[in-house]
Every structure is written in C-alpha cells, then in structure tokens.
Amino acid sequence: MDDRAGGDPAACADRQPDVDKSALRRTTRRRREATDPVWRARAAEAVVRRLIKAAGPLPGATVMSYLAFGAELDLTAFHEAILSAGGRLVMPRVNGSVIEPVEFRADGAVAVSAFGIREPLGDPIDPGQIDLVVVPAVCFDRRGHRIGYGAGYYDRFLPLTRADARHVGVAFALQIIDRVPDESHDHRVPTIVTDEEVIVVGDSPGR
C-alpha cells in the first residue's frame, strides 16, 4: 500500500482503499495478537506441514521466507526443513523503500531493525535467483489480495523475481477476511497456506 497526497476529489477517491485497509489491518492484528501462544505454535505446525507439501522439492531450491516477530506466524520449522534438505534460505532486509534478499543460515548473524524485526547481515543476492517466495501479510482474501504493514515492500519486490518463481502466502486461518480493498499496484498471490487449508486462487496474475 502506497501513501497518497493531494486535495482534489480524485486523490481522495484514490486514498479511500488505504483508509479501509488501515481499519482492516488494525482489526486483524488485534485478533491475531489476542491468540494464545500455545495455540499459535500448534497452528504454525499445521501451516508448516502444508507449506512443505505446497513448496515442492526443496533440495537445491532458493527459498525466501521471513523471520517472525510478535504474534506473527513462526516458520522456524519450515526453515529447518529447507536447510536440512540442502536448500538455500533467504530472508528479507529492508533498505530504504526496498527489500533486499539476503542469504540466511541458522547460525548466521542478524540485526534488529528500527521496527523490531530481525534481519540477516551480509550481501544481498539477485532476486532472479529465488525459486519460491513465502509471502507474509496481516490478512489475505480468497482472491489472493493481501494487506501488509502499509509500506508496499512486497508489492514492489515480487515483480523483481523470475516469471517462473512461485509466490505463496502464509497466514493463520483467522487472518483470511472476506475482501481486501484492492488497487492497481497490488500484487496478488496464487496460493495461500493456512493452518486449516490451502487456498488456490483462480485467475491470478501471481505465480
């Protein structure tokens, strides 16, 4: 989601989806943060089981995931499976307005960003090397639209990956909402894995 400015009616109309997204973001974050940590751990196990199947062969694959913070879905077990299978694990690092993919090892050094998010240290790799991107969000709808934290990082990053790279969203089932207000720059995901199901999005431009 990108910020918009201006005082004319057209600009105000453009800004309305952002207002709706802000309310949905707050509501869904509160719902997620109200869950019990033990429940979240069990739900994460269910997501990881489904995600490993949805991800396909891991040996030799370069997979970009994320390091959870707060009440986010923790994919540590998925990361261990990638590394155990001989795959290459990459994590995002924010640099200004863009995401840099950086290779990550279980014993690798990380820094904590100004937002409290752990980020890997090291040189970024070319996004074209990535085979699979695991895409987090505050919420998704069943059309593959997502709401992140409001800065549009993934909307800008995902088009930089190869045309055959796969994009898979992950979330707790409680983060699936009826409809996300969508805009032309939003990047949909074709698959969403939750603790209850795998949602396959029809007619999605994502990969």
Image (cartoon, rainbow, N blue to C red):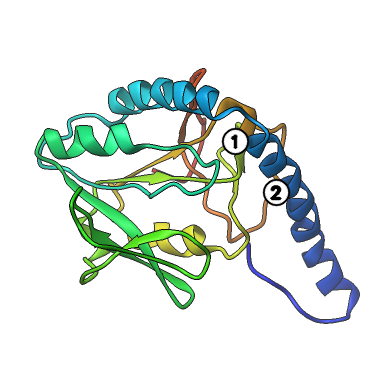
Residue 35 position (above or below residue 26):
above
Which residue sits at x=79%, y=66%? 15
Residue 180 position (above or below residue 15):
above
Question: Residue 97 placed where, x, y %?
Answer: 49, 75
> As shown in the figure, which amino acid type bears the numbered disc 2?
Arg
Question: Residue 151 placed where, x, y %?
Answer: 58, 65
Please give left or right for residue 80 compared with residue 139 in the image: left
Question: Residue 34 placed where, x, y %?
Answer: 68, 34
Task: Look at the image and tell me in which quarter the C terminus lies.
Answer: top left
Question: Residue 171 placed where, x, y %?
Answer: 52, 34
Name the quadrant containing residue 191.
top left
> As shown in the figure, which amino acid type bears the numbered disc 1?
Arg
Which residue sits at x=51%, y=31%? 201
Dot 2 alpha-carbon crowd within 10 angstroms: few under 14, some 14 to 19, many 20 or more: many
Q: Secondary structure at mark 1?
A: loop
Which residue sits at x=36%, y=27%? 48
Q: Secondary structure at mark 2?
A: helix
The first of marks 2 and 1 along the sequence is 2
Task: Look at the image and tell me in which quarter the N terminus lies.
Answer: bottom right
Residue 19 position (above or below residue 199):
below
Q: Which residue is mark 1?
A: 143
Quote the CA–CA distance across marks 2 and 1. Answer: 17 Å
Q: Which numbered circle lies on residue 25? A: 2
Name the quadrant containing residue 140.
top right
